[in-house]
Amino acid sequence: MRRLPAVLACLACLVFGGGVAFAGDTVTLVYLVENAAALDGQTVTIQGEVVGDVMMRGDFGWINVGDATGDVGVWAPAESLRKVQYAGRYHAKGDIVRVTGVFHRADPEHGGDLDIHAGQVEVVEAGGPVSRPRGQERLPWALASLTGALALGVVVWRRKGGLV
Amino acid sequence: MMRTPALRDIRAIAYYSGVVVFWFGTLMLLPILVGVVQQEWGPVIDFALSMGSCLCAGFALQLCCGERDPDLSWTQGMVTVAVAWLICVLLGAIPYALSSHWGSYLDACFDIMSGFTTTGLTLVQDINHLPDAMNTWRHFVSWLGGQGMVVLALSFFAKGLPGAYKIYVGEAKDERLLPNVIHTARAIWTISVLWLVVGGGMLALAGLGLGFSPGRAVLHGFWVYMTAWSTGGFAPMGQNILYYHSFFYEILIIIFMVVGSLNFNLHWSVFTGNRKEIRRNLETITFATTSLLLGGLAIWELGKIEAYSGAVELFRKAYFQIISAHTGTGFMTVYARQFIHEWGPVSMLVIVIAMVLGGSASSTAGGFKAVRVGVALKALVHDIRRLLLPESAVSVEKFHMLRSVVLDDRMVRTAMTIILLYVLALTVGTAAGAAGGYDFVTSLFESASVVGNVGLSAGLTSPAMPAFVKVIYIAIMWVGRLEFLSVFVFFGYIWAGVRRR
């Protein structure tokens, strides 16, 4: 019976797509957007992959953090952002970070953006280079189509004296 | 009686479609080049396969149809455009379909049609890890679609092409910058390339200030520029323009969206020294008036409901979204669901109106177009004035568009017909959304975005939406961009052929 409150709390987290929004519990990014008015000005914790670029702007900077449900901008001290080694792109999996900070539905400091002002950014899992498939199985098809195009192009050239 | 298509017609349509498909295929060299530089070998092979398919199709269509028809008819010109666009969509979607970022071939076709028509709605998945080659192609397709694929193909003809003007008109461009239509096509591309260098360069420099590495700044600068100018609305990252967190970047984008939505005739006039035309042109006056009015209304409503408090926030959020909607671009600096949750009904309605109004005729923008709205309003004022004048009085209404033009009934009828067709397409799109299980406001908003080739979303467009909604949206984007005529003639042609059998 002593476990019941904990079980109910976990169920509530699942049902409401991320859980109660206070520091410590992580919330999903779609939960932030869907409940932006209620969460405005509260301290929240999110966890996700840093995607794209780490954009340093003087003593502070921006990262964009994405989870399976969406992305959000995080404004944080440059010092804490220097810990981020990888941002997610085609060739890289970004660092997984846990961010705790104040959530803004319409940040007055940044022109009304929906964002988080983070006090700390913690790297919980290092990212790194990703090996992508080279598509060798499609190479013969690509070569065949280009060869076919070349052959047809020669015929067109001979008949018309040009390619069109 | 409807004219039935003869073999000669079909051969001519296939020939000119083949030419367009050939040039379209050669353009895949750009993403291949980017892929090689970035060592994205999988996408390079996918693009090579797609390019080969386009070239094969282009050559085959030319070979099976012999020589070009020296006397292309209006019908042939219109059908050629509709057919060429369809083939380019089907073949251009191959690299998307082969990647793991689109759920199906239908999703891939949706995104290519969205790019060609400069709509900007997307079904891409995991966009933040998209290869640079793929992102280049997405934005490049949008940029090409803005100017027009046929316009591009025409500009490569060294000699005069009989009937070229009839194909040119089929792509919803009807005015000549120069007496020769091939020279006109080249002029359009000259203007576009010059702006690409200037605009892409400016955004690349601005990107350096945002904290990007030089390579990323250049890529993002040119990607964003291409879809701003073409009023396309694709963005390389999941957060769209919100990703950049920069007022300065947003200001530059606003400028390029507006410039891209202007009539190519106006660009040419200014390019050749006639700068006064900007202030006198009916379209610029209409666009300035409606954007100020709609922007003002949105700011008033959003301020009233305290969605945003300060003047800067109100401007950045309200005005950016209004200009994006009005030019038919579809860039966003708010999340799709924020429209539903935080923007009041008046602001939503204002955005819908801005989307369907669109930009200028003969531009990269979609929607009703400013000139048609201007003509309809002039006609209304003229009719009221005529009723107030004595019956014997002769009243002539004029407007300025490069020259003084007398408003006549035919002009008004054409403008009103196109507006009516847009409203009809809006209704069909809204009904499709509602039939798919979405609420009315979301369905209306998304439909307006599709009809006007805008790209703003209230969250309806996603890979999870029903397949029939995707198909209807693809069809509406297609007819909306080609302004109905070419597609209607295409189906009329098919119908006439079927009836004959």
Image: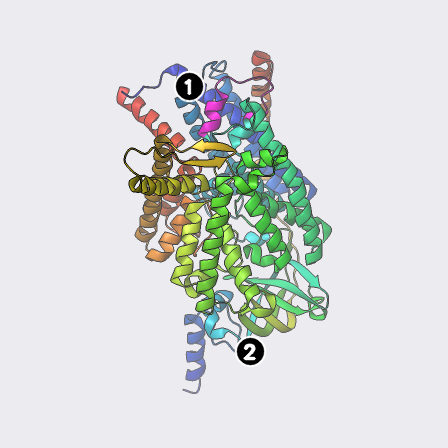
Assign a secondary structure to mark 2. Answer: loop
Task: From the viewer's perspective, tell me whether residue B111 is left or right of residue A100.
Answer: left
- Tell me the residue that label 1 is attached to: B73
- Tell me the residue that label 2 is attached to: A23
Which residue is painted at 53% across and 22% down in the image?
A: B59
Q: Nearer the viewer, residue B392 or B169?
A: B392
Which chain is indicated by disc 2?
Answer: A
Q: Quadrant of the N terminus of chain B?
A: top left
Assign a secondary structure to mark 1. Answer: loop
Q: Which amino acid lies under the numbered mark 2 shown in the image of this protein?
A: Ala
B165 is within the stretch colored magenta: yes
Q: Does the image show residue B96?
A: yes
Q: Picture coordinates of residue B237 (x, y %)?
A: 57, 53
Which chain is indicated by disc 1?
Answer: B
Q: Picture coordinates of residue B127 (x, y %)?
A: 55, 52
Task: From the viewer's perspective, tell me whether residue B499 is left or right of residue B10.
Answer: left
Task: From the viewer's perspective, tell me whether residue B446 is left or right of residue B124.
Answer: left
Q: State whether residue A147 is above or below residue A95.
A: above
Q: Which amino acid lies under the numbered mark 1 shown in the image of this protein?
A: Ser
Which residue is painted at 70% across and 62% down in the image?
A: A56
Q: Which mark is residue A112?
A: none
Dot 1 crowding, Cα within 10 Å, few <14, some 14–19, many 20+: some
Compute the Cα span from label 1 to label 2: 70 Å
Q: Which residues are magenta?
A: B154-170
Q: State whether residue B299 is above or below residue B416.
A: below
Q: Does the image show residue A143?
A: no
| Quarter-of-image position of residue B340 | bottom left
